[in-house]
Structures are given as C-alpha cells and as structure tokens.
C-alpha cells in the first residue's frame, strides 16, 4: 500500500478480505489456546494491529503470561520474558557493556544486549520493579530504540511490550509513572473466568497446560495485515469525535461532564487521541470493515483512556473509577456533533 | 477520486434530512425573532401613540416590515446554524449502522463498498415548539392591543391636546336642543358656542383639571337654563290648563250657569287667554280671528269656546313634548320632569260644579285661584274620616331576637323545700339560724361586718392559706 492509497482511497473488499481472514485466524487461535477470553484476545489483536503496547492488569493466575506466550507463538515473533522484581536493574532489561579482551590482546567495552531486543517482550509483573527500572522502558516503548553510553541502538521491528501487573492494592508494588502509563496503548483488565470456562479448563487440559497453536502467521502475513491496517479509512466526523472525546476528558473543556469536572485532575494527552484513532482502525479491521465508525471508537475508548485519566483524591474517596467516567462521557457526548437547537429532538428511526 | 455517477439513493436521503432539519431550525429561529420584534413593535406603537396623541396608525403599521425582516433574518441565521451535511451524514451513518461508509462516501470513492450501504432510514424528528408558538401568539395579541387600546391609556404630556371630543359633541348637541326648543335665543347660542370653542382650543394636557372644570361649568349653565325653562313651561302649562278647563266648563255647562256667573267666567277666561297669548303660549295658528275677537269682547260661542279649549290643549301638549325632549337630553333631572309633567291637569266638570257652588260668595277669579287647593267644599267638620287600605305584612321581614330568660337564672340557685297541692305560701327570708354568718341578712353587707367567733378563726385562716 502506498502513501497516496492511504489517504485517498479505501480498501476494496478483495483487498480487505485476506487481511481480515488472517486476523480472524489469529484471534481464533488465541481463543483456542486460552478459553473464555474472546473479547480480550480481540483487543490484544487490535493493539498488535495498532503497533501499540499493552498493559494487562489482573490477579496472579488468570492467564496473562500464557496469553502473551501464545501470541508470540501465533505471530511467530521472537519472544522474551522479563520477570520484574524489586531488585531488577535497568541493565538487566536493556543490556550492558562488559570489558572484554579482544583477539589482539586489547580490551574493549562490548555491548551485551538485554531482553528488550526482541519483537515481543513480556514484562511480567512490571509494577514490582522500582520506578528507576520501570523508566528504563520509556525510550524503548516510544522510540523503539535503546541509548546506552551515547549509542542508540534500534530495536527489532515490530516491537511490542506486553506488560502484566498486579492490582495496585497488593503489597510490594510500585505504581507505574504517568509517562510510562501513557505509552501503553491499552490497559486491559483480565478478570476471573466464569464457572463454565473453569470447568472446561480443568476437564480438557492436564495440569492446565494450553495446547500449542495449530497455525502460525508468517512474516508476509504480518506485513499484509499491517498494510491493510494502514489503509483503514478514518472519516472526518469520526476523527472530529475522537478529538472532542479526548478534549472532554479535561475538566476545563466545555463538553466535559459533571463527573469529569469533579473528579479528574488531568485529562488524556494528545497521544491518547492518536491511540484511539489507531485502535479504532484496528477494531474496524478485526470487524472486517474498511472504514472506522463511531462504534469502533466507542469499543476501544475505555481501554485507551482508563489508565490515562489522573483522578483526584476526591474520586478515590467517593469510589469513582475511570471506567464509569468514560462510560458517562461516551453516553453523553453526541458523536455526530449536530448541535441542534434545544427544541428539536431526534427521537429515533422512523420506519416509513 | 470521485467517479461521474448518478446520485446514489443514500445521498438523496442525506439531502432530505438536511432540508428537514434546516426547515425546522428556520421556523424555530424565525418564530423567536418575530416574537421579539413584535414585542418591541408593540412598545414602540404604544410610545408613539402616546406622543402623537393616537395619530399615524397607518404609519405605525409600517413597523410590521421590520418584524418580517427579523423573521427572515432568523431564517437566514438558522440556515447558518443548522447542522451541515457532514453532521447529518454522521447521524444517518450512526442510525443505520453503516460503520463509517456513509461518512467516507463524502470524502472518497467507495468503489464496490457503495453497494453495501443499506437503504437509509430517516430518523424521526420532534419539534417542541409549543412554548414558542404561545409566546408568538401573545406577542401578536400584544401588538393588536397596542394598536387598538384607547389613547387615554397612554400618558399625556403637558403640551399635548386633551381629548374632549366626546364631551364637546354632547354640549354642542345640548345647545342645539335648547335652540330648537326656543329656550335660548340666537345671541345666547352664539355666546355658548364661542365659549365651547374656547374650551376646546385651551384643552391641554398641562392642566386637564381646568378644562374639565370649564366643561362642567358650561354643562351646569345649560342645565340651569333648561331647568328654569322647564319651570316656566310648568307654570304656563298650569295656566293653560286652567284656561282650557274654564273654556270647556263654559262650552259644556255654560247654559246651566246663570248669566252673571257666565259673564264673570267669560271675563276670567278672556283674561287668562290674553295672558297666555301675551306670554306667547297661545299661537294664532290654532285660533281663528273671530274667536280671538269674541274672546276680547267676552262673547264666545259654544263652538268658539271648544275651538279655544282645543288650541289651549294643543299648546299644552307641545309644552309636554318640549319637556320630554329636555329630559331625553338629560338637561333636566327626573324630579323636575315629574313635577312639570303633572302641571295643567284640570277637571273641567269639577271646575264647573265648583264655580256654580261658590261663585255667589266670591269673584270668579278668586274661585279659580282657590279651586284645586282644598277648602270647605270637602265637607263639614264631622264628616266621617276615610281611610286608605291598612298596612299589609306581605313581604315584610322581621329580625328574630332571642330574649334572655332572666327568670331561669334566678331559679338556678333555688332549693326544693317540698311539694304541695295547695296554693304556695310566701315566707319572708329571715336571718340564718346557724354557722358563722348566723344572723346575717342577705344582700345587706353583713358578711363584712359580722363578728367571727374565736373558735372559727382557725378555719377561716386555713381557708385563706389554702
């Protein structure tokens, strides 16, 4: 797909179909490996299509690590895992220089790359590491590069960080800094599965071991879905809606809702608007559509915004969470921006 | 890249909804603008009517032009404010779950996706315009009221003329009536009209009390003139009535009178008729020259007497008609009218009988003045009294009043001492035979002077300490 194609035309059905099938197949494989997580798998796939990083939050044992492992296998990408602990140092992630004796007898500082040099990095229990170590990922996540001793080294393409974290309420955890949170496209909450799924897991899987994926996506397939993703069309009204939505998360905005004014200290950044637009494109592709609709935006917005809103202490006292606030925004804000006079009302679809 | 293809159905639906929304927005905005303009126009009309004393209504109607202009401006404003096709397209896309295809169609060529856009269904629009309509109706009524309301409702300035047209017209009419009834002469008419014109020209808002006072004065002057004329008419009518009655008495019973009485009566009639003629009450049109000559000579025949009586009666009728005209014009009050209306009613037969009875004792002129005023003709002093019907209680209402049973209050404190079949014997109350008040007489103030024995002091003390 060339640049002109991206801006002027939309994918035709025959162009969209192969990419849609590949994405669907990947999601199906994930569903097969991990039971009862269809919507989560879909959102992870959207994040991959959007080339974004994902923060998975959930209690231990709900399948976060297994999901990332399965994803690495299905996408056939290089996969590395770092278990974050309080004594983990930045060098343990990025790599370090070691003084080594060369063949000619001279000594030189040789760079030994860390686990970050991979396609798919699983940062397990990321909130158990100290802020210093957490911050080591900032450049890698945003610039897809690592700078050490004045030398910048690019990371492999594609590069995804899929981090898991325990809920903040648990002991021995460090909350992620806002700057790092903002670099995650999604924060997905991994809940416990219901009884039916649990029953299926223990009755079909010995020791809970997930089966290996039956299908893998090759590099060409990956390029194809990324190309298709780039060609998903974002209409102007939808783009406008995303902008208004993000602006409305700021208490000073004219379109901010009452809960936002009361409980939000800082709204979402422009990066959030970009993230929503990209994620909505990915969601449209997963749905098999060449254009982004309002419903795509609504589907991805909670996952994009929930970790980006900085709530006040009053919100904590009143037990108000960001998900409720985002839901209120989505239901209040008119997507179309019709701005009709108060005496004209659209009551529904008339069947003539 | 847009291809040159005919307008697809979904584009027509988009345009249709855009038109509907613009129409509704336009109506709503124009109603608001027109309502505001109408209220402003009403206020301006009220002020102008007060300032210009109610003139130039046609000119004020031109004020409706800005109302239409503002309504038009409202429509134009609404067209700018109404949702554009982009927003409407977004609305239809959302309502019909097009997934962004309809929105993208405005920006790019959909290619094969064009066929996958479903048949669009229009959303239902509801206009809550009742409040605006009510306000608009109120504004229209307000403007109408401002055009129709009497100008007096507006405040009159010091330099403005006072509207006394109605009052002036009434006074002019009264002057005309007095002139027609020959109560006032031409010079008086001119004087009154001049005075009225002067009041009209001096009627200014600066001092309305002065104008109203002058009008009241003129009105009172006319009423006084009319009342005096009515009084004179009553007197004339009275005199004419007597003359008429005498003429009839002579015409009908003259042959039965002795010659002396007839001569005296004729002479009296001649005098009365001459007085009436000199006062202008007897016109020559109704009486022939022969009759007038015979009247002077006192030799009226029976026929001439009847002719004279008829002429006198006719003149009396004219006076009664004039009285009625004055009353109709409210120039005289009802009391004066009733008083004058009854004047001149004379019983000719009674007069003839009275003259026959009393003419020997007094001259006819005296008898004429006494007749009708009571006197010995009513009978002797021991004549039985006549009573009219007694008072009737029909329709009368009496106020019910409860009389307090004073006796019962006395009996309340009485004691039964016994029952007997014989007549009750009265026993005088004597002094008490026991107790602290032994020997005290009731009502005699003995309680204050009675000596209390020492053995009773403790009891009395305890009573007051309780």
Image (cartoon, rainbow, N blue to C red):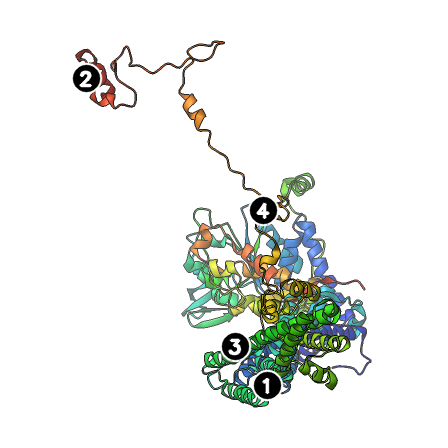
Task: From the top left corner, tell me how far across and down residue B384 is, in percent.
Answer: 61, 47
Q: Nearer the viewer, residue B254 or B120?
A: B254
* Residue B125 appears anywhere in the view: yes
Write down the chain letter for disc 4. Answer: A
Residue highlighted by disc 3? B220
**Mark 4 and mark 2 in contact (Cβ < 8 Å)?**
no
Write down the chain letter for disc 3. Answer: B
Q: Quadrant of the C terminus of chain B?
A: top left
Say which residue appears at 24% left-offset and 21% top-offset: B446
Residue highlighted by disc 1? B55
Residue highlighted by disc 2? B451
Residues under labels 4 and 1: Cα distance? Answer: 91 Å
Q: Which mark is residue A62?
A: 4
Secondary element type, mark 2: loop
Q: Residues within 10 Å of mark 2 (few under 14, many from 20)?
A: few
Residues under labels 2 and 3: Cα distance? Answer: 87 Å
Q: Quadrant of the N terminus of chain B?
A: bottom right
Residues under labels 2 and 4: Cα distance? Answer: 114 Å
Q: Residues within 10 Å of mark 4 (few under 14, many from 20)?
A: some
Residues under labels 2 and 1: Cα distance? Answer: 102 Å
Extreme residue in the left direction: B454
**Mark 1 and mark 4 in contact (Cβ < 8 Å)?**
no
């Amino acid at each position: 797909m060339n640049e002109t194609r991206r801006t002027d035309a939309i994918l035709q059905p025959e162009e969209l179909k192969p990419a849609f099938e590949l994405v669907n197949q990947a999601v199906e494989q994930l569903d097969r490996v991990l039971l009862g997580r269809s919507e989560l798998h879909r959102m992870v796939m959207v994040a991959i299509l959007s080339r974004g990083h994902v923060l998975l939050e959930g209690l231990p044992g709900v399948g976060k690590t297994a999901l990332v492992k399965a994803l690495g296998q299905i996408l056939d990408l290089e996969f590395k895992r770092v278990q974050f602990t309080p004594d983990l140092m930045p060098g343990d992630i990025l790599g370090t220089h070691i003084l080594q004796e060369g063949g000619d007898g001279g000594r030189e500082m040789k760079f030994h790359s860390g686990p970050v040099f991979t396609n798919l990095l699983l940062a397990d229990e990321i909130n158990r590491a100290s802020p210093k170590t957490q911050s080591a990922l900032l450049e890698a996540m945003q610039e897809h590069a690592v700078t050490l001793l004045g030398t910048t080294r690019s990371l492999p393409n594609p590069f995804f960080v899929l981090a898991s974290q325990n809920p903040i309420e648990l002991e021995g955890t460090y909350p992620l800094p806002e700057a790092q949170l903002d670099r995650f496209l999604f924060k997905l909450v991994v809940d416990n599965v219901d009884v039916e799924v649990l029953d299926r897991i223990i009755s079909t899987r010995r020791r809970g071991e997930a089966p290996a994926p039956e299908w893998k996506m090759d590099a060409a397939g990956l390029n194809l879905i990324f190309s298709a993703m780039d060609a998903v069309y974002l209409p102007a009204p939808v783009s406008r809606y995303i902008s208004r939505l993000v602006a409305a998360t700021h208490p000073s905005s004219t379109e901010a809702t009452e809960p936002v004014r009361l409980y939000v200290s800082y709204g979402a950044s422009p990066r959030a608007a970009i993230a929503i637009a990209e994620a909505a494109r990915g969601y449209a592709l997963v749905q098999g559509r060449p254009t982004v609709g309002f419903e795509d935006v609504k589907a991805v917005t909670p996952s994009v915004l929930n970790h980006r809103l900085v709530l006040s202490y009053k919100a904590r006292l009143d037990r108000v969470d960001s998900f409720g606030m985002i839901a209120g925004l989505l239901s209040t804000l008119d997507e179309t921006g019709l701005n009709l006079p108060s005496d004209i009302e659209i009551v529904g679809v008339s069947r003539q | 890249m847009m291809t040159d293809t005919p307008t697809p159905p979904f584009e027509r639906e988009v345009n249709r909804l855009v038109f509907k929304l613009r129409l509704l927005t336009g109506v709503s905005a124009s109603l608001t603008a027109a309502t505001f303009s109408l209220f402003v126009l009403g206020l301006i009309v009220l002020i102008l009517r007060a300032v210009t004393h109610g003139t130039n209504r046609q000119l004020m109607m031109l004020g409706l032009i800005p109302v239409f202009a503002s309504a038009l401006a409202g429509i134009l404003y609404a067209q700018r404010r109404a949702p554009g096709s982009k927003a409407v397209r977004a609305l239809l896309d959302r309502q019909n779950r097009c997934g962004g295809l309809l929105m993208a169609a405005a920006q790019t060529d959909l290619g094969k996706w064009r066929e996958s856009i479903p048949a669009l269904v229009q959303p239902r629009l509801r206009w809550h315009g009742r409040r605006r309509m009510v306000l608009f109706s109120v504004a229209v009524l307000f403007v109408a009221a401002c055009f129709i309301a009497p100008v007096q409702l507006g405040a009159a300035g010091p330099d403005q003329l006072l509207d006394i047209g109605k009052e002036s017209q009434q006074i002019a009419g009264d002057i005309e009536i007095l002139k027609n009834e020959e109560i006032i002469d031409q010079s008086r008419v001119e004087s009154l009209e001049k005075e009225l014109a002067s009041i009209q020209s001096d009627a200014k808002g600066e001092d309305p009390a002065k104008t109203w006072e002058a009008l009241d004065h003129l009105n009172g002057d006319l009423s006084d003139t009319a009342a005096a004329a009515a009084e004179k008419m009553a007197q004339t009518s009275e005199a004419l009535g007597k003359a008429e009655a005498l003429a009839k008495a002579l015409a009908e019973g003259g042959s039965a009178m002795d010659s002396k009485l007839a001569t005296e009566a004729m002479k009296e009639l001649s005098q009365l008729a001459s007085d009436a003629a000199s006062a202008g009450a007897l016109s020559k049109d109704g009486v022939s020259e022969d009759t007038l000559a015979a009247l002077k000579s006192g030799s009226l025949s029976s026929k001439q007497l009847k002719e004279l009586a008829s002429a006198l009666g006719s003149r009396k009728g004219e006076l009664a008609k004039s009285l009625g005209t004055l009353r109709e014009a409210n120039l005289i009050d009802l009391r004066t009218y009733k008083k004058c209306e009854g004047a001149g009613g004379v019983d000719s037969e009674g007069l003839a009988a009275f003259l026959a009875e009393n003419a020997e004792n007094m001259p006819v002129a005296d008898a004429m003045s006494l007749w009708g005023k009571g006197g010995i003709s009513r009978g002797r002093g021991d004549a039985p009294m006549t009573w009219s019907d007694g008072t009737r209680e029909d329709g009368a209402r009496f106020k019910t009043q409860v009389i307090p049973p004073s006796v019962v209050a006395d009996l309340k404190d009485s004691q039964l001492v016994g029952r007997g079949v014989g007549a009750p014997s009265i026993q005088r109350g004597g002094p008490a035979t026991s107790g602290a008040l032994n020997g005290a007489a009731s009502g005699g103030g003995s309680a204050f002077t009675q000596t209390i024995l020492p053995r009773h002091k403790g009891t009395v003390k305890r009573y007051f300490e309780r």
